Amino acid sequence: MKRLSKSNLGIVVVCYDTGADFIQRLSKYIVVSNNVILVINKFSSFKKQQDLIHSVAEVFHSNISDGSLRIEELPDNLGIAAAMNHGIRQLMDKCEWVLFFDDDTMLNCQNVDELSDELNGAITYIGDRKLGIFALGYHADDSQVDSRHDKDAGATHYIEKYAVISSGSIIAVDTFKKFGLFEEGYFIDSVDVEYALRLKAGKFAIVQSSKPLMIHPIGRRYEINLLGKKILFSEHNSIRCYYIGRNRIAVGIKYMKQFPEIFLYSQLQTLFHIGRIVAFEDKKLVKIIRMLRGVAHGLTGKSGKLIPGGSK
């Protein structure tokens, strides 16, 4: 069995416009790893970025001094994929595994052994096949007692997925060496989906635990009543709608031969998403225009960061 330890597990946390309550979350990460990298995607406010860095330096001075915590500032907001890749490169020669967190994700375990036991359970679950990604189960917020992953897995404790979110994902360094790093052209959205499908196409398994070892907020959500059943949906601003539309179609096209069902599902998702915007959300026109623009760019192979009003 493979054992995680504080020395062989690296953690990459991507920070953007991070709030002051991040200090509590960071203290949880340091409990399970001696190799924590904070990657600062340039904040929208210079003062807010410096305030966070000063707070971290003040509270975790000893960790910074002994090298168990490092702060890496990027020159611009380069997107989630570039930020994660920057962290991976810092850890590739010193760790065997990398665990990723968004800055709003709270880890909810006592020690690294608890993570290791979950990882080994996933390895046992897939038998002779190779593990590509192991994802921690999560609650959407600290008031929820249910988890969609609990329901998916049922009594098995583990379930195979097409894709999982990057926050809470554990990936072996050897996997990055074999398959490469995250696709930076996507900037945000579908970065985790593309990488999971890349591994699945290479016959590696994507496994999620049903045990919620973290709290991961979903963001702004709204509830609708559909055929007597209450359903929660996430609401995104117009720029996110662009990336969602673009990257869904890009991923679907890229893996159409291996996973034609993903291509069909992604297109149905986009149509349903537009329908939700029309029926339930504000700023309908700008969101729909940007989503359709994203779809057009995905079809023509455009990628990178959106420049509002520009050529992208």
Image (cartoon, rainbow, N blue to C red):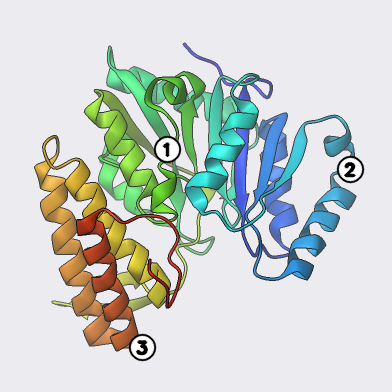
Instruction: Tell me which amino acid carries mark 2.
Output: His
Residue 193 position (above or below residue 176): below
Between disc 3 and disc 1, whose residue precedes? 1
Instruction: Tell me which amino acid carries mark 3.
Output: Lys
x 56%, y 19%: residue:
96
In the picture of the structure, the residue carrying the numbered disc 2 is 61
Q: Give the number of the mark in front: 1 or 2.
A: 2
x 65%, y 19%: residue:
94
* Residue 141 on image: x %, y %: 50, 61
- The mark found on residue 207 in the picture is none
- The mark found on residue 283 in the picture is 3
Question: Does 109 sit left or right of 285 as displayed?
Answer: right
Q: Mark 1 falls on what kind of element?
A: strand
In the picture of the structure, the residue carrying the numbered disc 1 is 135
Q: Mark 3 falls on what kind of element?
A: loop
Q: Give the number of the mark in front: 3 or 1.
A: 3
Q: CA distance from mark 3 to mark 1?
A: 34 Å
Residue nearer the viewer, 219 or 311: 311
Question: Does 39 sit left or right of 212 as displayed?
Answer: right
Does residue 235 appear in the picture of this structure? yes
Residue 84 position (above or below residue 54): above
Between disc 1 and disc 2, whose residue precedes? 2
Structural crowding at the residue carrying mark 3, measured as other residues with C-alpha within 10 Å and reported as few (<14), some (14–19) or many (≥20):
few
Question: Does 311 sit left or right of 259 as displayed?
Answer: right
Between disc 3 and disc 2, whose residue precedes? 2
Residue nearer the viewer, 301 or 190: 301
Residue 205 position (above or below residue 238): above
Q: Are marks 1 and 2 in contact (CB under 8 Å)?
A: no
Q: CA distance from mark 3 to mark 2?
A: 45 Å
* Residue 266 on image: x %, y %: 19, 56
Question: Quadrant of the rendered structure where residue 27 is?
Answer: top right
Q: Mark 2 falls on what kind of element?
A: helix
